[in-house]
Amino acid sequence: VTTRHTEMPLSLQVFALASSVAFVGTALAARIGPRLRALVDRPRTRHHHRKPLPRIGGVALFAGFAAASGLAYTAAPLSNPDDARRIVGVLLGCAFLFPIGLLDDWRELNWLPQLLAQLGATVIAISSTVFIERFTNPLSGDVIELHLWPYIGPTLVFIFTCFWIVGMMNTVNWLDGLDGLAAGVGAIAAILFAVHMNSLGQQQMSLYALALAGACLGVLPFNFSPARVFLGGAGAMVLGYGLA
């Protein structure tokens, strides 16, 4: 996919914009973050750092992902209205989670408000027809069709989708305790998603995976050991939701 005004592939433009915005944003966060004492992560059991570090890298990650997604959406409009609805749902879910994650970084919310927010974002995804209705049994290789189960099919689809999306967000949040792990794993996964989408002929959809990968790589130089900034709750929620 290319734009009309330049020979550079749109995929590279999306990736470069996401990584550039995230890189600049994280550099600023690393400089001004220590002054924001309420948004500083102090060493705890699961963390390896020995001094307080800002946990606002998620602001830069969200900004990079949002800017690049905006470029992808306007430069390569999705021809399939169903795909467009799903992408809008994912972007709205990220926008819904971002301020809540930032509030958690500031006030350290209890588990219940976080869970309710994550379930709310899952409802946004399901409402835009992003849900899991079938999956492959890893033990037998058989395809399990949840939506075909009599009477309880829709309920199973809802429960399984909630379990998957909420679980992914919390998994990424736990990974953020180690330098570079969450952003690194997120970048690798998103790149693999983009490659897989291209192999299926879904070039337009792959742009959003590239946007997420670029945002992760933009944050990564400041998140590698020794980390100068963490993703925080805002970054972990947005990244986990996007990957899910």
Image (spheres, rainbow, N blue to C red):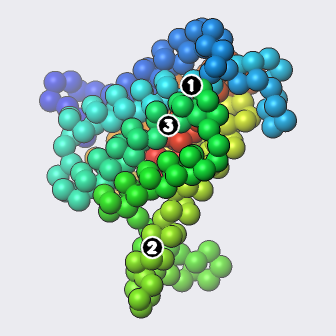
Residue type highlighted by circle 2: Val
Question: Which numbered marker is on residue 157?
Answer: 2
Residue at the disc numbered 1:
57
Identify the mark nearer the N-term, 3 or 2: 3
Q: Please provide percent x and percent y for residue 179.
A: 72, 30
Label 3 neighbour load within 10 Å: few <14, some 14-19, many 20+: some
Which residue shows up at 48% across the image and 15% down it? 24
Identify the mark nearer the N-term, 1 or 2: 1
Residue at the disc numbered 3:
100
Q: Is residue 185 left or right of residue 238?
A: right
| Quadrant occupied by the N terminus | top left
How many angstroms separate mark 3 from mark 1 (CA)? 15 Å
Q: Please provide percent x and percent y for residue 175.
A: 69, 42
Label 2 neighbour load within 10 Å: few <14, some 14-19, many 20+: many
Task: Tell me the quarter of the picture where residue 80 sits.
Answer: bottom left
Which residue shows up at 45% across the image and 69% down it? 158
Q: Which structural element holds mark 1?
A: helix
Q: Can residue 4 be seen here?
A: yes
Foreground label between 3 and 1: 3
